[in-house]
Image: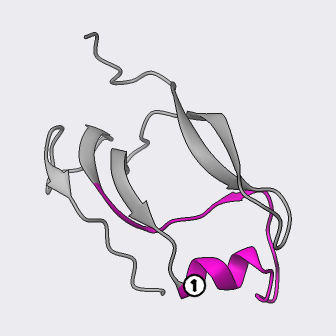
């Protein structure tokens, strides 16, 4: 298997195009991580009440399209310059304080 470090990758994502409409499975492009960014291979994710809130466009400024599912488990695929706390291959549970 060839390395994807530094390359744009293609993967599948459930995309919300409109408020309250069904999610659409699509192939999306993910850029390499920039300085202080980490790119993950997401293995598992869920939708919580915050995702549903934004999917239903109850937020002040609805933004579409969007990819929901900020609670996840995955493996670090690559890291940007300056990242020192995780490395490719690490198993992680990303945490977002704004939920």
17 or 35, which lies in front?
Answer: 17
* Quadrant showing the N terminus: top left
In this view, the residue farthest toward the top is 2
- For residue 92, above or below residue 1: below
Residue 46 image point, x, y percent: 44, 68
**In the rendered image, the vertical position of residue 28 relative to residue 13, given as above or below:** above
Q: Which residue is at a point 32% across and 74% down the rendered structure image?
A: 95
The residue nearer to you, when weighing 93 against 14, is: 14
Left or right: 47 with respect to 22? Answer: left
In the image, 30 versus 1, the foreground residue is 1
Residue at figure coordinates x 55%, y 37% from the top left: 12
Work out whether 62 lies above or below 45. Answer: below
- Residue 33 quadrant: top left
Q: Is residue 29 visible?
A: yes
**Left or right of 33: which side holds 48?**
right
Residue 36 in sight in this render: no
Residue 90 as seen in the image, left or right of residue 45: left
Check the image and report above or below for 58 versus 64: below
Residue range in magenta is 49-73
- Residue 14: say if magenta: no
Residue drawn where x is 62% and y is 51% of the image: 14
Judge from the rendering whether residue 31 lies leftward or rightward of residue 39; answer left or right. right
Instruction: Give the class, few, some or many, for how many residues have Cα within 10 Å of label 1's Cα (few <14, many ≥20).
Output: some
Instruction: Locate residue 54, reporting x and y percent.
Output: 70, 79
* Residue on which the image places disc 1: 50
Foreground of the two, 61 or 73: 73
Q: x and y percent of residue 79 in the render?
A: 29, 41
In this rendering, the count of numbered labels is 1
Q: Residue at x 44, y 42 (%)?
A: 34
The colour scheme of the drawn protein is: one colour
Tell me which corner region of the image, top left, top right, bottom left or bottom right, holds residue 51.
bottom right
Secondary structure at numbered mark 1: helix
């Amino acid at each position: 298997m060839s390395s994807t470090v530094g390359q744009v990758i293609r993967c599948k994502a459930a995309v919300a195009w409109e408020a309250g409409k069904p999610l659409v499975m699509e192939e999306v492009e993910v850029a390499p991580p920039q300085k202080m960014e980490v790119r993950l291979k997401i293995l598992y994710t869920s939708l919580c009440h915050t995702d549903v809130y934004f999917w239903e466009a109850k937020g002040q400024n609805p933004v579409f399209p969007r990819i929901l599912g900020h609670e996840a488990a995955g493996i670090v695929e690559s890291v940007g310059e300056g990242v020192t706390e995780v490395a490719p291959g690490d198993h992680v549970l990303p945490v977002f304080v704004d939920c």
